[in-house]
Amino acid sequence: MTDSSLTASSLWDLPPDADVVRSGEYELTLVRPGAPTDAAALPAHDPAAARRFAESFGTIDAVLEDLGTVPATDGASAGTRADLELVRVGSWGGVTEITDPGLVHCDGRFPVEEEAESLAERFPDAVIIASCTIDHHMTYGAYKIIHPDGTRLFAAGWYGESLDFWDLDGSPADVVGAFGITAAELSDAWVDMDAAANTFHWEGLFRLALQKVAPLDHTGRIESVFRVRHTEHAIGAMEEVWLEAE
């Protein structure tokens, strides 16, 4: 949908004040070669580059409004449907991070994987790490990691449920090798490499991988907030997952 006359609200079935009925986290980070791993060496946020990235992101049809910047340490959460129209983008030199509720998985499609693969085509030399979790009384997670050496890992499923409810493509061991993660680092992060997918500490592994290529400390950083019109498909998925009670 590209009709610029459409507002963010016009594609939604529910009103802006409709309550979000589930919680979760949704983030993708792209790291280009040469990005510093020391937070003090990271360049200042570039709002223009952040907007360009948002405008090119696959879940977003158009940026409707630039709402300025917020501290990157501020938590991002959606309380109403109108909040689902907000995305955050930090652009710090070779490190770009987007927080977008449109990364939600629905009906067998996984935007964390689709958007990561799309970015890998544009930036074949980049590390891309994406994740989305949703709390349905239990946690459903979807995780994607791409290393420019060709290593790829995708995992998605219900924590604690049967492995029959998990999708897994790739190996955590390959990620450990590609990023040079040590046994001591795995132990310190409580990542058990022998754990099954439904109990594996995916967040821990992904943070270790990201720490190898970019600083995790967001203290003192800012990022841009945009009100966007998501694609029609992304809106349909967000309505089903974030707004429809079970």
Image (tube, rainbow, N blue to C red):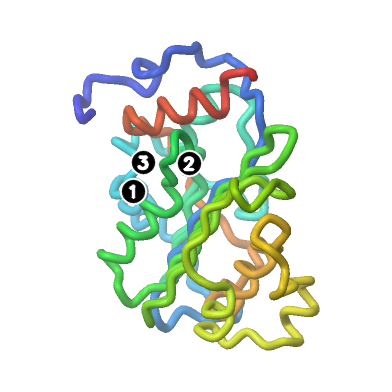
Q: Which amino acid does label 1 sit on?
A: Phe
Circle nearer the viewer, 2 or 1: 1
Element on which disc 1 rests: loop
Image-based side of 8 in relation to 80, left or right = left
- Say whether disc 3 or disc 2 marks the residue closer to the N-terminus: 3
To which residue does mark 2 refer? 87
To which residue does mark 3 refer? 59
Image-based side of 32 in relation to 84, left or right = left
Going 72% across and 79% down the picture, which residue do you hit?
A: 186
Q: Between 8 and 182, which is closer to the camera in this rendering? A: 182
Pointers 3 and 1 in contact (CB under 8 A)? yes
Circle nearer the viewer, 3 or 2: 3
Q: Which amino acid does label 2 sit on?
A: Val
Going 44% across and 40% down the picture, which residue do you hit?
A: 108
Query: How far across and how far down the image is residue 130, in percent?
Result: 50, 58
Q: Between 43 and 21, which is closer to the camera in this rendering? A: 21
Tell me the crowding category of disc 1: few under 14, some 14 to 19, or many 20 or more residues within 10 angstroms, Cα based: some
Quadrant of residue 193 within the rendered picture: bottom right
Query: How far across and how far down the image is residue 149, in percent?
Result: 38, 82
Image-based side of 9 in relation to 99, left or right = left
Query: How far across and how far down the image is residue 181, in percent?
Result: 63, 84
Element on which disc 2 rests: strand
Pointers 2 and 1 in contact (CB under 8 A)? yes
- Say whether disc 2 or disc 1 marks the residue closer to the N-terminus: 1
Q: With respect to residue 141, does 243 lie above or below?
A: above
To which residue does mark 1 refer? 57
Give the distance between the C-alpha atoms of the residues marked 3 and 2, in whole angstroms. Answer: 11 Å
